Amino acid sequence: MSVSPTDKLNLAFIGFGQRAPWLIGMVLDTMPDVNITAVCDVYPDRAEGAAAMVESKRGVRPFSTCEYTDILTRKDVDCIVVSSSWHTHIPICIDAMNAGIPVASEVGGAYDIQQCWDLVHTHEKTKVPVMLLENCCYGREEMTILNMVKQGIFGELVHAEGGYQHDLRDEVALGHEIRHYRLDEYMHRNGEIYPTHELGPIAKWLDINRGNRMLTLTSMASKARGLNAWINDKRGPDFENASFHFTQGDVVTTMIKCARGETIVLTHDTTLPRPYSRGGRLQGTKGIWSEDKHGVNIDGRTVSTTWAHNWDDLEKYYDEFEPQLWKDYRANGVVAGHDGIDYLVFSALIHSLRNGLPMPIDVYDMASWMAVTALSEQSIAMGSQPVPVPDFTCGKWIRRGPDKSSAYSL
């Protein structure tokens, strides 16, 4: 792809549900060098809403369609953003690459390991850029921890944890009413169905696909009671699915072993009452970080005055370890959208496309992180048996070093 730094980059958005309006609004409000030339949604009113939104803010109406394949032949599209339902992400990415159009996808889990291989093989064949828009990798806290890892502050890394822990009972239970795809997922699947928010930053800390890889995975699911309780309490016993036996367990725990010996624990917890947390934790031979504590305990730095030891507030470490990307970002004004991380992940995409640089979250990251969903379903279905994690790099992980091509590199 060749787009001059002075040219406007033309984006097409496929999918205009709950996520895309935020993203399109951010692009229209904060990225004057980016156009939105085409929009698509399977629901005509949503496609119309997306087109109207662009026209109201930019004065030019984009091409609008309900068939995403219509976008694949357009000459005014430099990159496609996939913000549709989970099950469409990989197929659309593959079709876009085969059409020669760079593509970036919102997050979710894969349904089948073969489709992850198909994603990788299509990219390797076409050489067309593809990126996973995992915004949590660009969190201020997560990037600061990454910088501390690179500088050896935690010593040799041993263990990491994270979770998608978010009370989504209303969104899931009312899925058919609000046309949200999560409901069907929870009715028929059982696994770590949304792994990348927590796994993305962890994978970057542990050098996954660049000197390390995930080897085996084991998952276990609790019983499913939260949605039934919410529906009966909020909508009554005659409401849709009040007595339906949901397949997705209320709490799913996944354990992963890495080639260098580290362990990872992921938690999916979205159908019981709870505050939001990604539950991040990282431990090494010299210290520990806890997201929920917003703190660290570092040998030689943290003064511990009790037998239980103390936490240092992470704020004390920002002056020294906050990456320059975030220092500059805060100095220029953080843009709204998940505490600013939406803007950064989009900026990383745009910067990489304009300069012909590697995607900071590349096809091997995308395949391996999304594969966790299908693998966890397999493990749970087999009584929590361990399952092997494929090496989507086919051995390249051994010699691939860290990407240092830009300020957005992770």
Image (cartoon, rainbow, N blue to C red):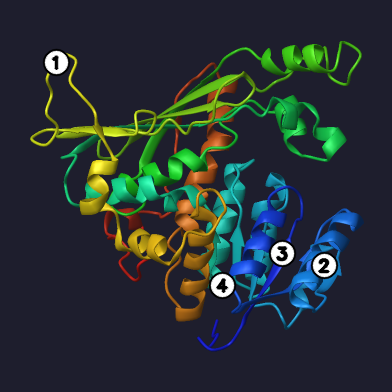
In the rendered picture of this protein, how many numbered marks are placed on residues? Answer: 4
Viewer-nearest residue: 312 or 65: 312
Q: Mark 2: which amino acid?
A: Ala
Closer to the eye: label 3 or 1: 1
At 45% across and 52% down in the image, what residue appears? 365
Q: Which residue is mark 1?
A: 306
At 55% across and 64% down in the image, what residue appears? 130
Residue 402: horizontal and vertical position, in percent? 29, 60
Q: Mark 4: which amino acid?
A: Thr
Closer to the eye: label 2 or 3: 2
Q: Mark 1: which amino acid?
A: Thr
Label 3 – label 4 distance at C-alpha: 21 Å
Q: Mark 3: which amino acid?
A: Phe
Query: Does residue 390 appear anywhere in the picture?
Result: no
Label 2 – label 3 distance at C-alpha: 10 Å
Closer to the eye: label 1 or 4: 1
Q: Which residue is mark 4?
A: 126
- Judge whether 83 appears above or below 350 on screen: above
Label 3 – label 1 distance at C-alpha: 54 Å
N-term-proximal mark, 3 vs 1: 3
Q: Residues within 10 Å of mark 3 (few under 14, many from 20)?
A: many
Q: Secondary structure at mark 4?
A: helix
Left or right placement of residue 361 versus residue 208 in this view = right
What number is the disc on residue 328? none
- Judge whether 168 appears above or below 203 on screen: above
N-term-proximal mark, 2 vs 4: 2
Q: Which residue is mark 2?
A: 51
Viewer-nearest residue: 108 or 292: 292
Residue 200: horizontal and vertical position, in percent? 44, 46
* Marks 1 & 4, CB-CB < 8 Å contact: no
Q: Which residue is mark 3?
A: 13
Left or right placement of residue 255 versus residue 347 in this view = left
